[in-house]
Image (cartoon, rainbow, N blue to C red):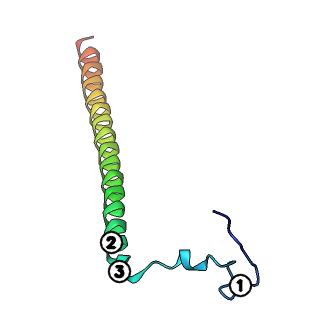
Amino acid sequence: MPLQLSPAHPDKAGGIGFLGIPPAPFLQVSLALSILFSSMISVKIFCMVLQLLIIAGTLGLGLLLGFMIGSRVHYTRQKNR
């Protein structure tokens, strides 16, 4: 399809400026799709943050239990001497 673009066209886009303007009947469809995609992205981000918090909590609990058991073992060894 040969295009005859002219930089001096009245729409200041070489005659294809109408492509950047969405038609009014499709405005609701484009709005619905943008809401759908943004909600999908936000759910993925929320799930990723939740997984990171679960991993960090598990590691923190493991370290806490390790320190508690380690100090208990150290205390009983010192007591038995």
Dot 3 amino acid type: Pro
- Estimate the x, y position of residue 30 in percent, counting from the top left: 37, 71
Dot 2 amino acid type: Val
The 10 Å Cα crowd at callout 1, few under 14, some 14 to 19, many 20 or more, is few
Query: The residue tagged with tag 1: helix, strand or loop?
Result: loop
In the figure, 42 relative to 29: above or below? above
Do the numbered discs 2 and 1 sit on residues whose CB atoms are within 8 Å? no
Mark carried by residue 25: 3
Residue placed under numbered mark 2 in the picture: 29
Q: Which of 52 and 15 is in front in this view?
A: 15
Query: The residue tagged with tag 3: helix, strand or loop?
Result: helix
The 10 Å Cα crowd at callout 3, few under 14, some 14 to 19, many 20 or more, is few
N-terminal label among 2 and 1 = 1
- Estimate the x, y position of residue 53 in percent, counting from the top left: 31, 46
In the image, taking residue 20 as reference, residue 59 lies left or right, namely left
Q: Which residue is drawn at 28% across and 31% down?
A: 62
Tag nearer the camera, 2 or 1:
1
In the figure, 49 relative to 10: above or below? above
Query: The residue tagged with tag 2: helix, strand or loop?
Result: helix
The 10 Å Cα crowd at callout 2, few under 14, some 14 to 19, many 20 or more, is few
Specify the quadrant of the image occupied by residue 35: bottom left
Tag nearer the camera, 3 or 2:
3
Q: Distance between the residues labelled 3 and 2?
A: 8 Å
- Estimate the x, y position of residue 56 in percent, counting from the top left: 34, 41
Do the numbered discs 3 and 2 sit on residues whose CB atoms are within 8 Å? no
Dot 1 amino acid type: His
N-terminal label among 1 and 3 = 1
Residue placed under numbered mark 1 in the picture: 9
